[in-house]
Image (cartoon, rainbow, N blue to C red):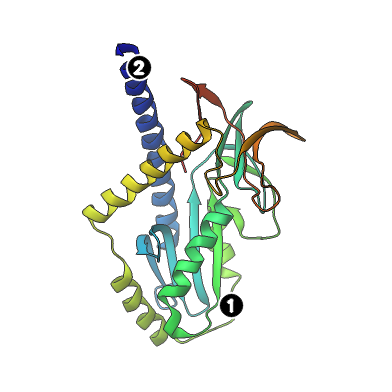
Amino acid sequence: MFFILLELLVFAGLLALLIHQVRLKGYLGEKAVKKILATLPKDQYLVYNNILLQTDYRTTQIDHIVLSVFGVFVIETKNYQGWIFGNERDEYWTQNIYGKKTQFKNPILQNYGHVKAIERVFSDFGELKIIPIVAFSGRSELKVNVNSQNVITFSQLKSRIGLYTLKMMNFETVMKMAEVLVHANIDSKENRIEHNRKIKSNLKNNNIKIANNVCPRCGGNLVNRNGKYGRFIGCSNYPKCALQRKFKMRLFGNFIPANAP
């Protein structure tokens, strides 16, 4: 019993450290992008950072939202370094630093969820031009295979926003949208704590399912497979469920993802 408790304590400690490291990197990246966005012309752009919105099923945190006469920019920030590999529809992308590989959630898919939340918030404004952007640190080298031209580095962010020059609305409408967004933002200490608690809970539940060879997405069986880039765990319900994951370490009989969601 003592050794089981010790293993659980070590597991909890490693999980907490992992989540803390991910949050710290995210905070520093968001701070850098915040400074860049602050230089946009104030008479055309309104910038909102670290917004927490309530969706039908959960809360969602959006790094940056830029309301402008040219459309709504929804920006996901990734403060990573090294080579970044991934495809448009992969559930996970890979970070490679001198041969050390870790995985993280596909930021395009992450940002798609943010876009849908924004659409609901601004549903009374009719059809809007919403531009999703994923911005990586300049310390990273993007080797991704995507159709979107809006997977970029921090240094490219301002110029990429500047490419959108077709005026879609007047600034009075932009200010009305800002009022709606501020009202929809449920950011508070209590809500942040609950949001983070659910992230930890979901990660723990997913790990338990994976350890028991159960797909956390659809409930199907997980099976070992060989692919172009090596061994991976896939769902037996493929192609209906396209879950594919690689894992960097095995701890106490449980598979633990290399990066928190």
Q: Which one is in front, 221 or 230?
A: 221
Considering only vertical position in the picture, is 115 above or below 165? Answer: above
The answer to which of 205 and 179 lies nearer the viewer is 205
Residue at numbered disc 2? 4
Q: Which residue is mark 1?
A: 165
Disc 1/disc 2 C-alpha distance (Å): 61 Å
Residue most extreme to the right = 228
Q: Is residue 167 above or below residue 260?
A: below
The percent coordinates of residue 221 (x first, y second) are 61, 39
Q: Residue at x 40, y 58 (%)?
A: 60
Looking at this view, is 59 or 175 the one in front? 59
Q: Residue furthest top?
A: 2
- Position in image of residue 201 (x %, y %): 37, 42
Looking at the rendered structure, the secondary structure element under dot 2 is helix
**Left or right: 101 as drawn, with respect to 228:** left
The residue lying at 35 percent from left, 17 percent from top is: 4
The residue at the point 37 percent across, 30 percent down is: 17
Mark number displayed over residue 30: none
User: How many C-alpha atoms fall within 10 Å of the one at disc 2: few (<14), some, or many (≥20)?
Assistant: few
Q: How far across and how far down the image is residue 87, in percent?
A: 68, 49
Picture residue at 54% right of the left edge, 72% below the top: 130
**Callout 1 amino acid:** Thr
Q: Is residue 63 above or below residue 92?
A: below
Is residue 257 visible in this depiction of the protein?
no
Label 1: which secondary element: loop
Disc with the residue nearer the chain's start (1 vs 2): 2
Q: Position of residue 244 (x, y in %)?
A: 64, 41
Identity of the amino acid at label 2? Ile
